Amino acid sequence: MRLAVLSDIHSNWPALEAVAAVLETESPDAVLCVGDVVGYGADPALCLEWVREHTDACVLGNHDLAVASSEGIEYLPDHGQLAAEHNAEALSHEQRHWLAHLPLTARVHDITLAHASPQHPERWLRIESFFLAQEQFRHFDTDVCFVGHTHLPGVLSASLGVLRPRPGHRFLINVGSVGQPRDGDPRACFALFDTETFALDLRRVPYNVDRARQRIREEGLPEGLGRRLDRGQ
């Protein structure tokens, strides 16, 4: 089965629209989302409705929770708090209810999904050390777990010396960010993954960054949220 896995869309409709066009061409068997559909960007309703219509499973991200219920909003950076408040006002009660009731983790097609980590999905851990990364493998029992949260794509293996996904080993895969990449590459990022061969394509998709930045300005959100899209940081 060929899966497309998206994360950290962050209300960036121009980026999601470009990714959606690629998905139409690629025709994966299923589309999955590992959270943070909203936050930071200017178009939460468009992004939320696309995810509802086109994904087979979606888990809760910390910005989703902040927008849906204000829970944890104080832990977001200042610009993130302002964007969460904006996004909450832009969504209907029913849309916020949908966000609030997303699961923290999911198991789909023998794949585990979690926004930040499978170990403590409710704590929004940042997996930024080798030891914390290795600990994650104790907290899911599938061969592969997909995460996002850091906006940095990458692959971690439970087996030393195994650098690329292949059958017979276990992997934690960060699919990067559709709407706010932070690895120095401003192009949208998502994953295509084959559950039989373990072939992984961390696909980069150019999109209209100027339009995304303009929408941020039109909605009165902080200019810094638009500038960082240019840098991919």
Image (spheres, rainbow, N blue to C red):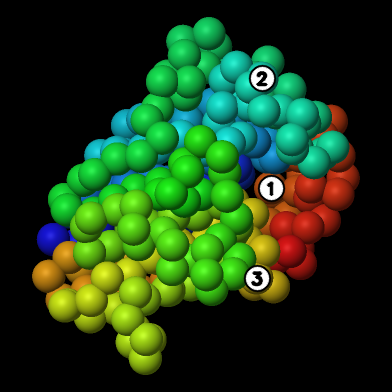
Q: Which residue is mark 1?
A: 212
Q: Which residue is mark 3?
A: 183
* Position of the N terminus by quadrant: bottom left
* Position of the C terminus by quadrant: bottom right
Q: Is residue 83 left or right of residue 106?
A: right
Element type at marker 2?
A: loop
**Which x, y percent locates residue 64?**
55, 31
Q: Is residue 123 left or right of residue 73?
A: left
Q: CA distance from mark 2 to mark 3?
A: 28 Å
Q: Earlier in the sequence, mark 1 or mark 3?
A: 3
Q: Residues within 10 Å of mark 2 (few under 14, many from 20)?
A: some
The answer to which image quadrant residue 187 occupies is bottom right
- What type is the residue that disc 1 sits on? Ala
**Which x, y percent locates residue 94?**
46, 10
Give the mark toward the camera: 1 or 3. Answer: 3
Q: Residues within 10 Å of mark 1 (few under 14, many from 20)?
A: many
Could you tell me if residue 23 is visible in this image? no
Above or below, 118 relative to 155:
above
